[in-house]
Image: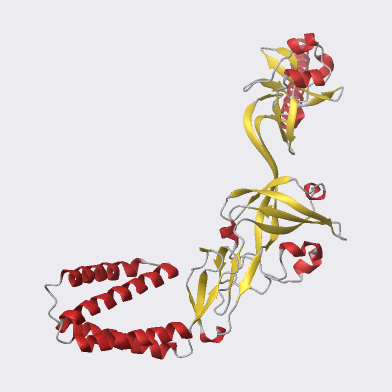
Amino acid sequence: MKEQIKIEKKVNKKKLIAVYIAGGLLLIYLIYIIYLLIKQPTNVFTVEEGKLYQEETDVGYVIRNEKVVEGKNYKNGMEQIIAEGEKAATNENIFRYYSSNEESLKQKISDLDNKIQSAMSESDNKSNSDAKLLENQIDEKMKNINKITDVSKLTEEKKEIDSLVTKKAKIAGESSPQGSYLRKLIDERKKYESELNSGAEYVKAPMSGIVSYRVDGLEETLTPDNFSSLSKEYLENLNLNTGKIVATNTERGKVIDNFSCYIATIGSSNEAKQAKVGDSVKVRLSNNAEIEAEITNVSQESSGDVLIILKVEKQIEELISYRKITFDLIWWNASGLKVPNQAIVKDNNLDYVVRNRAGYLSKILVKVKKQGDKYSIVDTYSSEELKNLGLTDAEIASYKKISLYDEIVINPDLSKIK
């Protein structure tokens, strides 16, 4: 009996050891599977539509073709005729300096206007339809004038109101017993108005373009004619604050070429070092607008960086308030069929992917349009392109094309593909 018990204990012990061994092996297998899943969670990828960018965020200095204009009477103060950001034609009045006794003359004109209005109200011109029509026009313009924010339009509207008031006064003067008194007031007003206008100094636009009163003193330095003198050290020594709006000037104005402007930037990326004059890129501004840009100048810095000058022909109005900005420089972008770089293998200097359809693997020749850090945009070759690559007519006829939603193998082994 004791012998039987000993035998059973040995058997149970062996079974227990076997269970431990099996459990250990299973644990090792599970750890290995988890390791494989972590290392490479899947060995296939579904082809999808996508877009790739190669871009960087840079600091840029805005360079414009602009001309500062200033008159002799800048100490008298100025009145904008054409508002900030509006366009002017060559020789058009853009602002004026007040005359030396402007406030006094304006007060006299205002006093005369009150006297004229008072005299007209006492006149019996109710039956005069012309006077009533003018009165309605004056009332309508007075209602609208508070809604106008544009300086030039506001000035023009005030001039029209003054003209209508003068016309009404003349009519009232002709039909009123007080006609001689009204005519005297009107003549006196004209004299002061003429004195006011003759004493003011009007400043004209030297060229057509965008009017701005944000003058920072760099208009004669940062110009398209001065690219050769620019350097990283020079630009940094300007000590400009990025994104700061240039303050409005109350003594001078300027006219900016509205067809193009330039952005100078310092780059250190591989793309910047490979940039060439004539290359097309894109610029994304702070308002998220993406605009085309052309590289017009490239110069090497002693530090190894590259000074690049970009020419833009859109969103000029967006840039007139700034001298130093941050922006995104988009070197390239491509859209199409997006695949992982790990799925692309080379064979005889050609790029291939391996497609998996129901377990059947096919070697697919693809054209890599653009390659990013992790993904590439690929396309199919045309028959002409395949011929130029040296493929035979038979190979071209049997050419398999990659398609949307194809499943392709990650890290494929071409030696196993027949």
**Residue 190: x %, y % from top left:** 35, 84
Q: Depth check: 403 or 188 in front?
A: 188
Say whether residue 77 is left or right of residue 161: right
Of residues 6 and 162, the one drawn nearer to the viewer in this rendering: 162
For the image, the number of numbered tags is 0
Residue 385 percent location from the top left of the image: 77, 22
Residue 289 visible in the snapshot: yes
Q: What quarter of the picture does the C terminus occupy?
A: top right
In the displayed structure, would residue 2 be above or below residue 261? Answer: above
**Does residue 2 show up?**
no
Q: How is the image coloured?
A: secondary structure
Compared with 13, 36 (above or below) is below
In the displayed structure image, the side of residue 51 where residue 148 appears, left or right: left
Say which residue appears at 63% left-offset and 52% top-offset.
Answer: 313
x, y percent for residue 165: 27, 76
Report the side of 124 relative to 47 (left or right).
left
From the top left corner, tell me how far across and down residue 13 is, in percent.
76, 18
Residue shown at 24%/79% (left/top)?
A: 170
Q: Place residue 3 in its image quadrant.
A: top right
Q: Residue at x 24, y 84 (%)?
A: 116
Q: Quadrant of the N terminus?
A: top right
Q: Nearer the viewer, residue 42 or 171?
A: 171
Q: Examine the rendered structure and indicate whether residue 204 appears above or below residue 43.
A: below
